Image (cartoon, grey):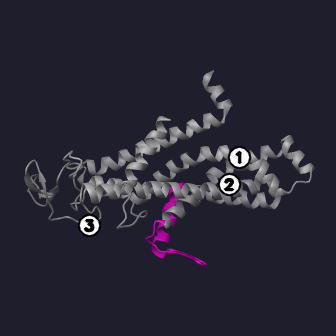
Amino acid sequence: MGALVVVAFMVTACLLAPVYAHQIAHEDPFSSNLLGRIRLNGRMVSVLQANTQGAGYGVTPIGPTWHFTNYFLGADNQGRDVFARFLYGGRASLLIGSVSAVICCAVATVMGLAGGYFGGAIDWVVSRLFDIVWAFPIYLLAISLSVILLTSGVNIGPLHIGPGSMMVPILIIGAIFVPYVGRPLRGIVLSLKEREFIQAAIGSGASDWHILSREVFPNVAPSIIVFFPLMVAFDMLTESSLSFLGIGVQPPNASWGTIIQDGLGLLYTRPWVAIAPGLGIVITAGALNVFGDGLRDAFDPKAKLRGSI
């Protein structure tokens, strides 16, 4: 429950990003503010200040003011409010992680149910598709697909997605994790198929659709519910990795991965530009994993029993 509260807090804070940026900070987190000035401690100061290190060339962004209404975490090298970008970046990371997890779990459920229940040629095709995706290192496959689709977009029949759309990383991440959910679900269906109540339903002449929807799926649903928050965490980490490499979320959008990449050159002078999104990823992904473990314990009495021995 504590993990759920943490996730709910992060989601709520990120959803309120427009309110903070436009109503409280009065900043546009997506536009450069190289000549901007703010009032700090009763005097006007530049957002980008003259560099005082080395030969003094260049500029250094203003550091954290710790004033909630005014560059709370400081500025990046473009003079943009880091905290406002952090909230917007969280929106993108959580959106991509959640939607790709929905796609992944939905496709994996259909393939796992079909392969495990019908067997034969259908199971062979499903298993081989899982094997093909499973054969590639997960990040290498994601990087390869991202490089290809970010230049050409997705054009399959009536489906047209531009190369800069956030749907590109959503589809890529949702597809590459399908075997990681589909294989366990297929195994569960195979074991359920041998149970007496399934055999009784088959013997009574019930249709395959009736058995799948009324007998098999309700027994698989708890596992899907447990998988979902775990997949959201994995998908967020994958999206952040791709965005950090520049092949995930594309400008003008921002995600926690792109903000970390922006902060690489400021690690020694303004480390909070990279630390803040890194902490956001760690806290959110960790809370989602703990919440997923809690769901597993709630739906699996045997797991709770093992934990108490």
Q: Residue 50 occupies which quadrant of the picture?
A: bottom left
Q: Which label belongs to residue 220?
A: 1
Q: Secondary structure at mark 1?
A: helix
The answer to whether residue 203 is left or right of residue 249 is right
The amino acid type of the residue labelled 1 equals Val
The answer to whether residue 35 is left or right of residue 246 is left
The amino acid type of the residue labelled 3 equals Ser
Q: Which label belongs to residue 109?
A: 2
Q: Residues within 10 Å of mark 3 (few under 14, many from 20)?
A: few
Q: Magenta segment, which residues? A: 138-166
Q: Secondary structure at mark 2?
A: helix
Q: Which residue is mark 3?
A: 31
Q: Position of residue 148 (x, y in %)?
A: 49, 71
The answer to whether residue 67 is left or right of residue 222 is left
Is residue 134 something one can see in this rendering?
A: no
Which quarter of the image is occupied by the C terminus?
Answer: top right
Q: Do the numbered discs 1 and 2 sit on residues whose CB atoms are within 8 Å?
A: yes
Q: Position of residue 27 (x, y in %)?
A: 24, 60
Q: Earlier in the sequence, mark 1 or mark 2?
A: 2
Is residue 296 something one can see in this rendering?
A: yes
The amino acid type of the residue labelled 2 equals Thr
Q: Residue at x 68, y 50 (%)?
A: 183
Q: Residues within 10 Å of mark 2 (few under 14, many from 20)?
A: many
